[in-house]
Amino acid sequence: MDIIRRNTDYALRIGLNLAQRYGQKAVSARILSEEENVSYQLTCKLLQKLHKSGLVGSQMGPQGGYFLAHPPNETTLSSIVQAIQGPLSINRCLFEKRICPKQPDCPISKKLAELQDSVESFLNNNTLGDLY
């Protein structure tokens, strides 16, 4: 099981591509697809999700395409992960306490909660601007 799913990895790559072009003209989904080696159809789906979440803007017309809606240093990795796959969960027991009869005293759950906090902190404290 992957913590970061394949589609989220692709979205992070697309986001990084847009971050590196920040402040320049919009870029087409086709170009992003080719440059990031992601199918055109999947690129369009990912861009729609990123657009819906407000991370990516779009421009219509002959010079149209997509652009990063906020500066790269303000676009967290967490925001992209959340837009594509929702919140990360190391283990269901951390979010659905009722599924485990050993809660709240489980020593495994306590360590997994530390890992969950570390992952969330990493994603919240790193931006697209940190990647280049």
Image (spheres, rainbow, N blue to C red):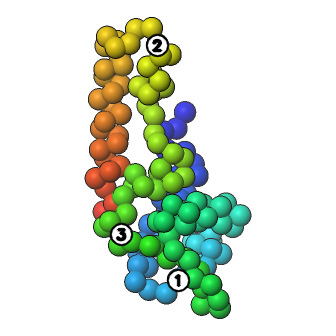
Image quadrant in which you'd find residue 93: top left
Q: Residue at x 47, y 65 (%)?
A: 55
Q: How far across and down, in percent of the image, does residue 119 sit?
A: 35, 40
Mark 3 touches mark 1? (CB < 8 Å): no
Q: How far across and down, in percent of the image, does residue 129 sit?
A: 33, 67
Q: Secondary structure at mark 1?
A: loop
Q: How far across and down, in percent of the image, does residue 8 sit?
A: 53, 52
Residue where numbered disc 3 is placed: 72
Q: Secondary structure at mark 2?
A: loop
Residue nearest the observer in this picture, 104 or 12: 104
Q: Distance of mark 2 from mark 3, alpha carbons?
A: 40 Å
Marked residue nearer the N-terminal end (2 or 3): 3
The residue type indicated by label 3 comes to: Pro
Residue nearest the observer in this picture, 37 or 43: 43
The residue type indicated by label 1 comes to: Ala
Relative to 60, 19 lies left or right: left
Residue where numbered disc 2 is placed: 100
Q: Residue at x 30, y 62 (%)?
A: 130
Q: Distance of mark 1 from mark 2, alpha carbons?
A: 49 Å
Relative to 96, 132 lies left or right: left
Marked residue nearer the N-terminal end (1 or 2): 1
Residue where numbered disc 1 is placed: 26
Q: Residue at x 41, y 25 (%)?
A: 94
